[in-house]
Image (tube, rainbow, N blue to C red):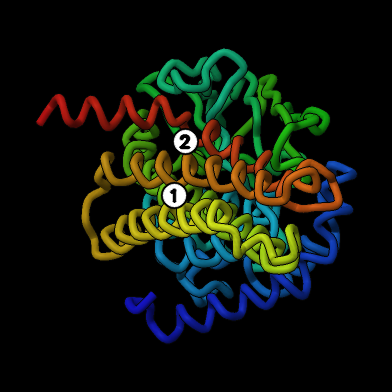
Amino acid sequence: MEFLTEEQRLIQETVRRISREKIAPHVDEAYEKGKASREILKALAENGLLIISLPREFGGIEANATTRALVIEELAKVDGSTSMYVFTSQALPAFLLAYGTHEQKERFFGFLSSGDKICPFCLTEPNHGSDARSIKTTATLDGDHYKLNGTKSFISSGTLASLYLVFARTKEGISSFIVERDTPGFTRGAPEKKFGFRSSEMCQLFFEDATVPKENLLGHEGAGWSQLQDCGAALRAWGAGAQALGIAQGAMEYALKYAKERVQFGVPIIKHQGLQFMLADMAIQIEAARSLVYRTTRMLDAGYKVIPIMTSAAKCFASDVAMKVTTDAVQVLGGYGIMEDYAVHRMMRDAKATQIFDGTNQIQRRIIGRKLMEG
């Protein structure tokens, strides 16, 4: 991509190498067990990939939206679950940069600077997914602490995390809090058994009079919803959109390699026009998704106010492309495509999940439709 800076090109190449050398060898075992790979987490930590958004004085690279997207895309080409650790762990730093006080930044960036901490985004509840504005988890001020009560669901990397960005209903409306792992009254459920992203351990979170210092409130009471509309919406482009793009690219590369090696009717199957057309359509769709994702991240980096049509379109289109491309990649491999020894079946499962989390694609279309209606 011609618009990348020299630093971004170097970061992209470095993450690509790390993905292939340090992560790829452990992906299949982690996927089969449905558990996080300690080797993968170690590779992420040792190379600073969990703290890319932190300011440089805390060990990060102050990654902007485009740089975050580059890192997540490269990881997702090899493994969606690994990209999920990085994706979810950039949300809290992004919110902290945008809305945190100096004291909060010093405290929490200092804690994260070790490079080995996971910090997921916690909004969804058992009865409130798409209808996020109706969440029921409450936070009540009690002296110098808030008491949190409620349940959060589908929290990616929730079993592994040290800090959690939690949204709860306060007297003034939805508010955001940074919750520490050892908070009294806060517990985590067992890892969920999932169809996709199997090794990015997901769980429920339970708050029973969980005692959170009032200093852990981000911004003011009631600011949480506007934070979600701004900083939260941006995640759809540099996070979910880039992740889906990487999964699609990885699947196409896998199918292309197979098509060059697999011989039928005396020639590699890529020489058959039917397969060429399938692969050509994959390439077209991926390049269209890449253009949309990175146009959106560049607008964010240029200081444009978050444009819901762009962020929602980037997530929706890229994840739909990922689903189509991975399904076709399975078809290219034929019978081998549904065998667990071949990665495309895993990529297809992960692609399906990208159409659902971070706001279903139906919700993204609803957001876009409303904006079009408003003019």
Disc 2 element: strand
- For residue 201, above or below residue 61: above
- Going by the numbered disc 1, the residue's amino acid type is Phe
Residue at screen point 59% across, 45% down = 328
Q: Which quadrant of the view contains residue 22?
A: bottom right
Q: Categorize mark 1 by other alpha carbons within 10 Å: few (<14), some (14-19), many (20+).
A: some
| Residue that label 2 marks | 176
Q: Which mark is residue 225?
A: none
Is 14 left or right of 306, judged from the image as shown?
right
Q: Nearer the viewer, residue 146 or 360?
A: 360
Determine whether, in the image, residue 301 is placed left or right of residue 62: left
Q: Which residue is mark 1?
A: 95
Q: Nearer the viewer, residue 337 or 354?
A: 337
SS category of the residue bearing label 1: helix
Q: Residue at x 37, y 47 (%)?
A: 314
- Residue 167 is left or right of residue 187, and the answer is left
Placement of 293 over or under 39, stated as above or below: above
Residue 305 is situated, as x and y percent measured from the top left of the image, at 22, 50
- Quadrant of the image occupied by residue 40: bottom right
Instruction: Report, in whole angstroms, how far the alpha carbon at label 1 lies from the one at label 2.
Output: 9 Å
